[in-house]
Image: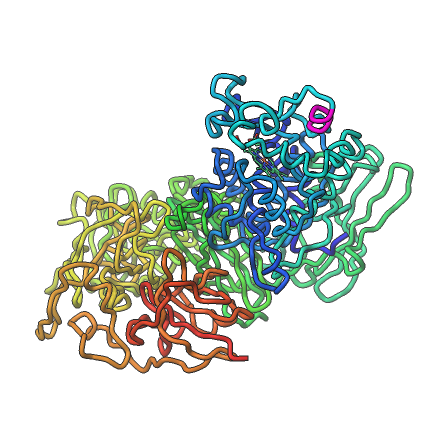
Amino acid sequence: QPTWPSSIDELEDVMFLGSGYRSRGFHSFVTPCSASPDGPGRQTAAEWLRAGFHDMATTDIYYANKGIVHGGIDASLAFELNDGEDIGAGFNSTLLVYANFFNSRLPVADLIALGVYASVRACSGPVIPMRGGRIDATAAGPLGVPQPQNGIGQFTNQFARMGFNVTDMIAMTACGHTLGGVHAEDFTNIVAPGTAPNDFQLFDDTLEFDNNIATRYINGPDTDALSIGISTASGRNSDFQVFSADNNATLQAMTVPAVFNSMCISILQRMIETVPPTVTLSAVIEPYEVKPAGLQLTLLSGGTQLTFSGDIRVRTTVRSAAQISSVQLLYTDRNGASVSTPIDTVVAGTASGFDDSFSFYSFSVDLPVTTSISSFTVLITGTDGTTETYDNNGGGFPISDSVIVQTPQSCVNNGDLTVVAAVRSSVTTPVNMTVTEKVPRKAGSPTPSPVPSLVSTTLDMVQGDTIGPYNIYSASYSIASVAGTKYGVASGSFSDTFKDASDLGTTCGSLNVSEPSSTSSSIVSTSSTSVSSSPIVSTSSTPVSSSPIVPISSTPTIGAYSFQGCYTEADSTRALTGASFFNYTGMTLEQCATECVGFSYWGVEYGGECYCGNSLNTGSVLATNQGDCSFVCPGNSYEYCGAGNRLEMYLLSSLASSPSSISSTGTTQTLHIVPSAGLYNYYGCYTEGDGDRALGAAFYPSDTNTIEDCVAACSPYLYAGAEYGRECWCGNSFGAGSAPAPDSDCSMVCTGNQYEYCGAGNRLSVYIMNGTFAGGSAGSIPASSSQISSIPSSPGSSSTATSATAAATQTGATIKPSIGKYAYYGCQTEATNIRALNEASYYNYTSMTLEMCASDCGGYAYWGVEYGGECYCGNSLNAGSTNATESDCSFLCPGDDLEYCGAGNRLSTYYLTE
Ligand code: HEM
């Protein structure tokens, strides 16, 4: 039994939870054995088994034995679909299924191996032992899959190259060709079209994993199209060639069912354990007897209690659920003391796989934050009174309360992911959020892979309230899709990760600084259900209160009222003296609007104070600093509710001269599209790309974002785009699918300037660098994006500088001669039709440094950073990668602007010196 948590946990769930509660559904694709979503003439189980062979078959053990990565089960198949050796629609559909299960904890290569296990078992075959830990290739491998026309000499050599002798070759082929058959559509000279049902000629007379392939070959009637029939004349009777290579001795032995099964277990296990030398496989995976699932700590309002919830999965294959009287958690608090009161559970559901069944025992308890929890053991009491304790190999099941994601306060709305986390005040390291998205591949050799790449972005989180012993942090990030998107929060060695964005609601709840109380000090009656118009719905039944989430912007209109700006109080009297209401725990703009119905003006001050009036008293003026109104509304974390001596002021729209113009003494500032800033001019409102960022080369989030700041941050990129108020994206070209949208779509106010528009959800206010210096020293205007994209400023060279490069006030960056054990190799181009370094890759467009890439690629002979945020590793530079002008590698590293991190098609490359 592994110690939980372990690296195979995700794989173990997919392997054993076939159906039922918390099941993963992998088995359903091959259950029953005949299943195929693609209609008659296809068998998914057969396609999965064949995919396993084809992925492995390009292995070269000569290289592997020398420690050089060379094929094996590595999912390189995903890049090889059009190489002429992988014929048939089954490979693509297989990989598309695996792509859905693929994530940072479950590589496609392990899924290919698991597919062999699942297809054999779903078709009543034996259990093929399964291990985890494979590593996905990042590019196509060499050719070398046996083809029916090859002939026995070549087959023998090919299998020898893979590490298998003649007997192995025969057994593996028989164990493969017990499932499925040959498609006439793809192999017309093996099966003549129109001669087999659905043009699919089965190898034997069953769809099951059985010894019929052997008995029919030895005893007849042989209907294997790779053994008899028209394949013989065309020299494509490969099964006959292979099976007869030892005068039928192996096939003869395999006519005995038990021999067939034991040979298949052994040879298919060896097939899926053919892995690159860099891979260390786990132990053979057995189901946990007891495994926690979905454990979560959640800080409650007031900061005195944490909810601890989740499920305990108990294997019920041997001891049935009916024999269990109770499952309890005995826990140790955060100070190491055992707590005498156990946590009780109730049955939440059952699940099963091919060979095992499970019951889930669910719990949810509130624990004091002071003592909290650090680990637990599971006590199972049988109906006969016997007890068993599961202590996770001695140490108990660990649970950390240092960094916790607050799912009730987190949400995804219109593509914008907001994550709130509670972090123990004792944790002093910066808190960041990482979002990992599945991005469809657009490039690949020779065709794009059907498997997406995982792209992670790490953002700093912003500290908000302190609630009890926790500081509350938040961050927002716009995502292309919730499907497959994972997020997590980390600080130093503490983290709460691998959360599904798809599990979040569309509205973020709020978290009280103070404990919920029924005796509210609010003057406003709690029956004022007007707050129900607020878009924020608290997920708990507690009244909402001050929140850590940074509001996006001021709210332009509330019902019949429109925003006038942030106003001061009047001279020696309040600005509005018609009526007043207070609600320091649940105030929203909507609530104040409702309370003040009938008045011309209302304003909210100091978070919880609502004032109404028909005129502004003398002395109340627009505040010089509009950012003064910075208190978040306690009842709606997306709204501002004034500040001390500052009112968030609204006036009946019918009385307002212009809904979005704010007049102040002498000046009129209007919320507007900034026409130009620095060298950049407004280019239009654009959508995000289709599964790809419109402008993804660099990213600068800021709570003081303005158009001016954004273009400055993006310089010398050709385009700068402000999105969602606080986001600033840069690029030299647009990602596929990004399209112009009406200017009115870009309706969000910049977080740093309420008079400027900064995009919206999935909308970017885009600026193009085609202007001249504000100071008047006109430079040449780049004519095309290709022109400008090639001229980010050059280190050590100003001869090619244009206005664009000069505008990039690049400072003290230098080429670092060495990074740890790596020395500078040069500014390299990509290779021909392949990446220069293609053995591993990492992306971090917000904080990449040379040191980061060196550490990610530790152990590889080379690494290089490209395009600012892309880190590639490899043991050799692929053909075609040449040394370019040093000054080409001109992008500053996003995480260290004193370092260069390549450029477009240029890698700042380093090599291992010892
Ligand atoms: C000399 C070696 C081999 C050759 C030349 C060969 C060739 C073929 C061919 C031509 C097909 C028909 C594909 C189609 O029409 O869709 C096929 C199907 C299949 N092969 Fe092989 N094969 C070999 C070895 C293996 C091995 C070692 C395995 C697995 C252990 C395997 C598993 C399968 C399976 C499961 C199918 C059925 C696919 C389906 O029904 O969609 N083959 N093979």
Q: Is residue 406 rendered to the left or right of residue 441?
A: right
115 vs 614: above or below:
above
| Frontmost residue, 725 versus 545 | 725
571 vs 546: above or below:
below
Residue 350 sits in quarter? top right
| Frontmost residue, 902 versus 776 | 902
Report whether residue 27 is seen: yes
653 vs 860: above or below:
above
| Frontmost residue, 464 versus 689 | 689
Residue 35 sits in quarter? top right
Q: Is residue 216 magenta?
A: yes
204 vs 397: above or below:
above
- Number of numbered labels in the structure image: 0
Residue range in magenta is: 213-218
Display colour scheme: rainbow
Tell me which residue sits at (35%, 81%) in the image: 814
Report whether residue 571 is seen: no
Quadrant where the image shows the C terminus: bottom right
Q: Is residue 167 rendered to the left or right of residue 508?
A: right
Residue 672: image location, x then y, percent: 17, 55
| Frontmost residue, 149 versus 88 | 149
Please, what is the dominant secondary structure of the magenta stretch?
helix
Tell me which residue sits at (31%, 72%) in the image: 884
Residue 792: image location, x then y, percent: 25, 69
Q: Is residue 913 magenta?
A: no
Residue 602: image location, x then y, percent: 28, 51
Q: Quadrant of ligand 1?
A: top right
Residue 21: image location, x then y, percent: 65, 35
Q: Is residue 173 rendered to the left or right of residue 693?
A: right
